[in-house]
């Protein structure tokens, strides 16, 4: 096998100065959520580690994750794809197509057995033998299993790959689910979001590329550095929440003043993501900052968890849980009152009968 | 004037009684603050800086009440250990438990005029077990939400799995809210039942939760359980 280039080799080839190389390593270090002490490790890895081979496949999805990915600024998505990873196969970004393209996939899997990173976007469709999602003449399930078998690590990009996403929303006609049931033994890194933040996508793949291991993961398999906080706990509107200042409507004075969107069904208190601190597109904004309540897109079943604009789900015309609760409370109270009356009436009737029968009642 | 011979049965230790009344107070506080957290009330003043509402304070009261409620279970458990009268679990391993439960249930359905007298009747025991189950759900879901503001903490390690089991943290919120209503419905039924037993059946259900003893004219069926 020919010697594979490292990031530093690639920099030398492109005439990038040592200074700029170190600079990009600094950026990478902070982006991956590592402390500055780890900079030397990152530099060493970037000098010595061959560029990681990445196979990027797309299943049942809208490719919105890629739309997000190509807007990554640091590292620039173009730099990442062209010079920081060795992207051998990608359904969306490849110019090639057809039979040679599919053959290249088989060759890549053969050549880099147990070394390549498999990035997966999109859900697995399981109903009717998976015919709802086909790729290269086979079902996506087939492709996924083939590629996952020899992968060093698997990255599940987007809520679809993690938990099924929109096509898994009730009633889930295609039987869609997350990829984890079909990946075999390789470690899976879950990067949920609809889509995930661009820098999170690049940060995760760079971590695996440089260190050869998945980043520290939480109980749901998500990288801790990006999914370790609730949006609510990192939200710049949190002080308004604590002070009890809420927007009641999207067009009221509270919304205009930038108050907390909690009452409009904001899912910030239930959602783990970096929107609050990293934000989107070079820290420009994120949904709450632009005045829209968070919909909790990095939660596994966020499509099915009630209306996005209600704190408590409403049940048709009956109303939400509080209305139902009050109704049941009134009914229960009326019920026990009726029971009390009935008990008293029954008792007094029986007492009279007992007296009439000379105490020989019952 | 009628002379009645009554016997005193010492039933509830002070630990259980104090626990009971702490529970009552805390459930009221937790329920009211909980509703306010789910649907905050805004009292607007001309200048928002001086708003009279504080979500922070309401949440803090909710959390403190929750911790007091959990801590009060120490009393409950201690009473359970030292006093037989505090042991209120339904005796499902005893055959006669089932027919007695049916008997009491038929009485409450107004079908049977009388039921056998119990110090702690089997239907009530079932309802307490159900209440504890509801409280357990509230404790688990509550701490799961509370501690997950730092997923690396010990509390998150102990309770974080609840969110995963329920299929997401939003579900934890909803279940916590719905079960709270269940506890209130239990409370309505419970208050009615004890008052009914006190005044219609001479069971001193209300007074025993203050005094600890039941002073009864009749001999309850489960009196031997205290020995």
Image: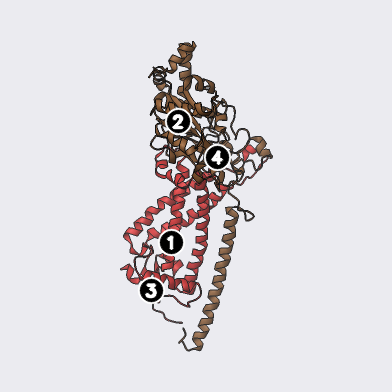
Chain colours: A brown, B red
Measure the C-alpha gap from mark 3 to mark 1: 20 Å
Measure the C-alpha gap from mark 1 to mark 2: 53 Å
Measure the C-alpha gap from mark 1 to mark 4: 37 Å
Residue B160 appears left or right of A332: left
Classify mark 4: helix, strand or loop. loop
Q: Which residue is mark 3?
A: B220
Q: Which residue is mark 2?
A: A118
Residue B19's x, y, as percent? 42, 57
Residue at 62% from the left image edge and 37% from the top image edge: A292
Q: Are marks 3 and 2 on the same chain?
A: no
Q: Are marks 1 and 4 on the same chain?
A: no
Question: In front: B170, or B114?
Answer: B170
Measure the C-alpha gap from mark 3 to mark 4: 57 Å
In this rendering, is residue B55 above or below A21?
A: below
Q: Which residue is mark 1?
A: B128
Residue B122's x, y, as percent? 41, 68
């Amino acid at each position: 096998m020919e010697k594979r280039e490292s990031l530093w080799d690639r920099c030398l080839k492109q005439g990038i100065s040592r200074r700029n190389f170190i600079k990009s390593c600094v950026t990478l270090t902070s982006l991956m959520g590592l402390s500055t002490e780890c900079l030397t490790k990152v530099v060493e890895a970037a000098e010595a580690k061959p560029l990681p081979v990445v196979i990027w496949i797309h299943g049942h999805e809208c490719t919105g994750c890629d739309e997000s990915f190509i807007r990554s600024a640091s590292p620039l998505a173009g730099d990442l794809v062209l010079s920081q990873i060795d992207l051998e196969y990608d359904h969306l970004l490849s110019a090639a197509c057809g039979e040679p393209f599919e053959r290249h996939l088989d060759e890549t899997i053969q050549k880099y057995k147990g070394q390549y990173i498999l990035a997966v976007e999109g859900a697995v469709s399981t109903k009717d033998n998976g015919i709802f999602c086909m790729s290269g003449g086979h079902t996506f399930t087939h492709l996924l299993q083939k590629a996952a078998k020899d992968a060093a690590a698997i990255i599940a990009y987007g809520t679809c790959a993690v938990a099924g996403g929109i096509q898994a929303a009730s009633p889930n006609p295609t039987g869609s689910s997350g990829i984890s049931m079909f990946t075999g033994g390789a470690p899976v890194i879950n990067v949920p979001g609809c889509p995930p933040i661009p820098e999170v996508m690049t940060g995760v793949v760079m971590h695996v590329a440089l260190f050869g291991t998945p980043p520290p993961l939480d109980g749901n398999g998500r990288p801790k550095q990006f999914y370790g906080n609730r949006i609510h706990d990192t939200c710049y509107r949190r002080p308004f929440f604590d002070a009890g200042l809420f927007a009641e409507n999207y067009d009221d004075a509270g919304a205009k003043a930038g108050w907390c969107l909690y009452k409009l069904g904001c899912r910030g208190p239930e959602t783990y993501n970096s929107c609050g601190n990293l934000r989107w597109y070079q820290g420009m904004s994120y949904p709450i900052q632009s005045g829209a309540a968070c919909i909790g897109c990095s939660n596994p079943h966020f499509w099915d968890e009630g209306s996005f604009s209600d704190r408590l789900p409403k049940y048709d015309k009956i109303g939400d849980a509080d209305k139902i609760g009050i109704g049941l409370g009134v009914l229960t109270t009326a019920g026990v009152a009726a029971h009390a009356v009935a008990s008293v009436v029954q008792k007094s009737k029986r007492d009279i009968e007992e007296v009439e029968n000379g105490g020989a009642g019952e | 004037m009628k002379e009645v011979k009554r016997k005193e049965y010492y039933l509830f230790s002070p630990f259980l009684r104090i626990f009971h009344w702490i529970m009552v107070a805390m459930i009221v506080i937790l329920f009211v603050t909980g509703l306010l957290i789910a649907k905050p009330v805004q009292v607007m003043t001309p200048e928002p800086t001086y708003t009279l509402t504080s979500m922070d304070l309401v949440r803090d009261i909710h959390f403190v009440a929750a911790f007091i409620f959990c801590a009060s279970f120490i009393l409950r458990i201690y009473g359970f250990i030292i006093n037989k009268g505090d042991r209120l679990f339904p005796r499902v391993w005893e055959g006669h438990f089932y027919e007695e439960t049916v008997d009491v249930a038929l009485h409450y359905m107004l079908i049977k005029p009388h039921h056998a007298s119990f110090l702690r009747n089997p239907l009530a025991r079932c309802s307490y077990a159900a209440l504890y189950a509801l409280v357990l759900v509230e404790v688990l879901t509550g701490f799961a939400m509370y501690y997950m503001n730092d997923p690396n903490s010990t509390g998150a390690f102990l309770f974080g799995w609840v969110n995963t089991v329920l299929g997401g943290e939003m579900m934890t919120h909803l279940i916590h809210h719905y079960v709270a209503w269940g506890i209130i419905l239990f409370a309505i039924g419970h208050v009615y039942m004890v008052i009914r037993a006190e005044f219609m059946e001479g069971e001193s259900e209300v007074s025993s939760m203050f005094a600890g003893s039941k002073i009864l004219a009749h001999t309850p069926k489960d009196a031997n359980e205290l020995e």
